[in-house]
Image (cartoon, rainbow, N blue to C red):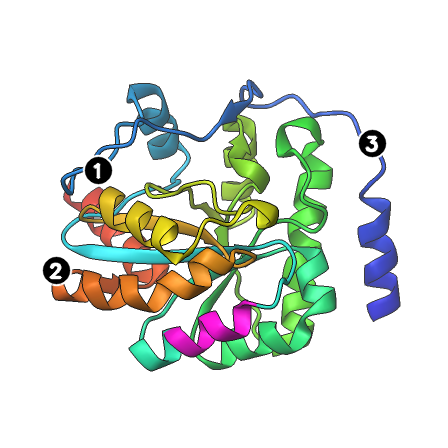
Amino acid sequence: MRYFLLVLCMILALPMSISASSSNTPYNWGFAKNKDHVKPEVGKQYEEMLKRQKSVYVGKDKNVYLTFDNGYENGYTPGVLDVLKKQNVTATFFVTGQFLESEPSLVKRMAKEGHIVGNHSWHHPDFTQVSDERLKKELKCVKDEYTKLTGKKEMRYLRPPRGVFSERVLEVARNEGYTTVFWSVAFVDWKTDQQKGWRYAYDNIMEQIHPGAVILLHTVSKDNAEALERAIIDLKKQGYKFKSLDHLLNEKQKEKSAD
C-alpha cells in the first residue's frame, strides 16, 4: 500500500491541464511591513479574497501564532523542537512529501509533542500551474503519509508553496477541508548560504511583531534556530501569548458568528 502511494505521488509530477473554476490569476503573498506593534497592510483585494475563501493570515489581541515551513531538513528542527518543549509553546509545521519521507521520526515527534502538522504539498509545485485534480492529489499524498506515520487522520491547514496562490487554489483547498494559512511576519531566512547570525532573525521578529501575528520561519535557518528561544522569552515579557492555529480558527469562527 505504501509503495502504491509513493508511485501515485510520483505520477503527480506529470503536467495536467488546469480546470476552470474561480479566477486563477496568480498572486505572490506579500504586504507592506509595519513596525511599532502594528499589523501589516495587505490591501482590500487580499482581505476580501481571504474572507470569501475562509483563509487567514493574522489574528488579534496579544496572541502570536508560530509556524514553520519544512521543505527539507538541515539539522536544526530537533533543536527547534527542544526550545518549543522547554518554553511550552505549540507551533505548526508545514511539511512536504520530501520531509515526510526523509524525516519520519521528526514528524512523529512533532505530533507526539502536541504540535500541529500542516500541508505544504508533496512536490512543492506552483499551485496556480496545476489542475484541480493534481492539487487535490498533492494534498492527499501528504495527508495519507502523515496518517500512516502518526495514526492521526486530521490535517486542517495548508500553506501554498512559496506563497503563490489564486482564488481557485484557495477554493479548491477550502473544498478539500483546508484552511489556507498565510503570515504577517516574515523575512528572508531560507537562504542557507547567506545566514547573518542570530541577531538578524531576532531583530526581524521583534521589529515586525504585532498583536495577532502569524510568524513564518524556515527550519533550515541556523539564524532562526539560534534566535528562537531569545525571541520567545522576550515576546512573553512583552505580554504576548503563544497560541495554536486551532485557537486562531476558533476566533475567526466566533467573529463570523457575531457578524
Q: Quick one: quadrant of the C terminus?
A: top left
Q: Is residue 173 left or right of residue 19?
A: left
Q: Amino acid at mark 3?
A: Pro
Magenta stretch containing residue 135, yes or no?
A: no
Q: Is residue 62 shown above or below 109?
A: above
For disc 2, the neighbor class at 10 Å (few under 14, some 14 to 19, many from 20) is few
What is the total number of numbered labels drawn onto the structure image? 3
- Closer to viewer: mark 2 or mark 1: 2
Q: Is residue 89 visible?
A: yes
Closest to the observer: 121 or 152?
Answer: 121
Mark drawn on residue 39: 1
Quadrant in which residue 240 is drawn: bottom left
Residue carrying label 2: 238
- Spatial CA distance of label 2 from label 1 is 16 Å
What range is drawn magenta here?
76-83
The secondary structure that dominates the magenta segment is helix
Residue 121 place in picture, x, y as percent: 64, 49
Residue 90: x and y, percent?
A: 36, 70
At horizontal 59% and vertical 77% (from top left) the residue drawn is 108
Q: Secondary structure at mark 3?
A: loop
- In the rendered structure, are the residues bearing label 1 and label 3 in contact, judged by CB atoms less than 8 Å apart? no
Foreground label between 1 and 3? 1
Horizontal side of 175 relative to 129 (left or right) equals left
Q: Name the residue that disc number 3 marks.
A: 15
Q: Which mark, residue 4?
A: none
Mark 3 or 2, nearer chain start: 3
Q: Residues within 10 Å of mark 1 (few under 14, many from 20)?
A: many
For the residues labelled 1 and 3, the Cα–Cα distance comes to: 39 Å
User: What kind of residue is marked 1?
Assistant: Lys
Compared with residue 158, is residue 131 higher up or lower down, i.e. above or below?
Answer: above
